Amino acid sequence: MRTSAMVAALLAAALAACATHELDPELKAEAEKPLICSGAEQCTAAWRAGQVWVATHSGYKVQTVSDSILQTYGPPGAISSTYAYELLRMPQGDGTERIVIKPFCGSIPLCSASPLEVAVDFKRTVTNAIGRSTAAAPTQ
């Protein structure tokens, strides 16, 4: 009986926590909008900004890093309130690249931000870096 009561209490707490992460349509749209850079300079700046963002926002150490992927240790399967990340840099074949972030939290109700909020913060940071690299580029 005690186990049933504990499970019920945990389920109620998880559902209550989920309610705090309500789905905002504007946030969802911004999170799902592709992050595209153009040209070597802009894409290098975006990739570097993305790497720094992941390194400073993840509760886990970086496990794998290359010019096209960055992965941290962490979640899948772990119960944790800390995000782990996978970052991908994907050439699109037209001189542009798409940068994709995949946030993983071991227990969404325990995480301080929703995956959408995390993705939007990441995209805003990288987009600002793209803007700075474009503004700093010499004019010809």
Image (tube, rainbow, N blue to C red):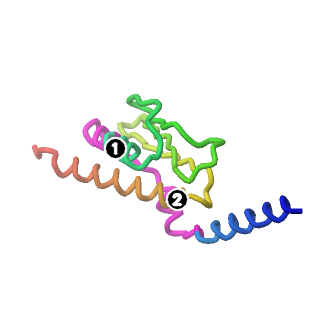
Q: Residue furthest right?
A: 1
Position of residue 73 measured from the top left corner of the image (x, y, whole percent): 51, 36
Do tag 2 and tag 1 residues touch (Cβ < 8 Å)? no
Q: Is residue 60 magenta?
A: no
Magenta segment, which residues?
Answer: 21-47
Split into 4 quadrants, where in the image is the N terminus? Answer: bottom right
Residue 57 x, y percent position in the rendering? 41, 50
Disc 2 crowd rating (10 Å Cα; few below 14, some 14-19, many 20+) is some
Q: Nearer the viewer, mark 2 or mark 1?
A: 1
Measuring 73% from the left and 68% from the top, which residue is drawn there? Answer: 12
Residue in the foreground of this view, choosing between 20 and 2: 2
Is residue 92 visible in this depiction of the protein? no
Dot 1 lies on which element?
Answer: helix
Q: Which residue is mark 1?
A: 52
Q: CA distance from mark 2 to mark 1?
A: 19 Å
| Amino acid at pointer 1 | Val
The residue sitting at 48% across, 61% down in the picture is 117
Residue situated in front as seen by the camera: 20 or 60: 60
* Magenta stretch encompasses residue 25: yes
Q: Quadrant of the C terminus?
A: top left
Q: Is residue 58 above or below residue 63?
A: below
Residue assigned mark 2: 116
> 139 or 70: which is nearer to us?
70
User: Is disc 1 surrounded by few (<14), some (14 to 19) or many (20+) residues within 10 Å?
Assistant: few
**Of the residues shown, which amino acid type is indicated by label 2?**
Leu
Residue 26: image x %, image y %? 50, 69
**Vertically, is 123 above or below 13?**
above
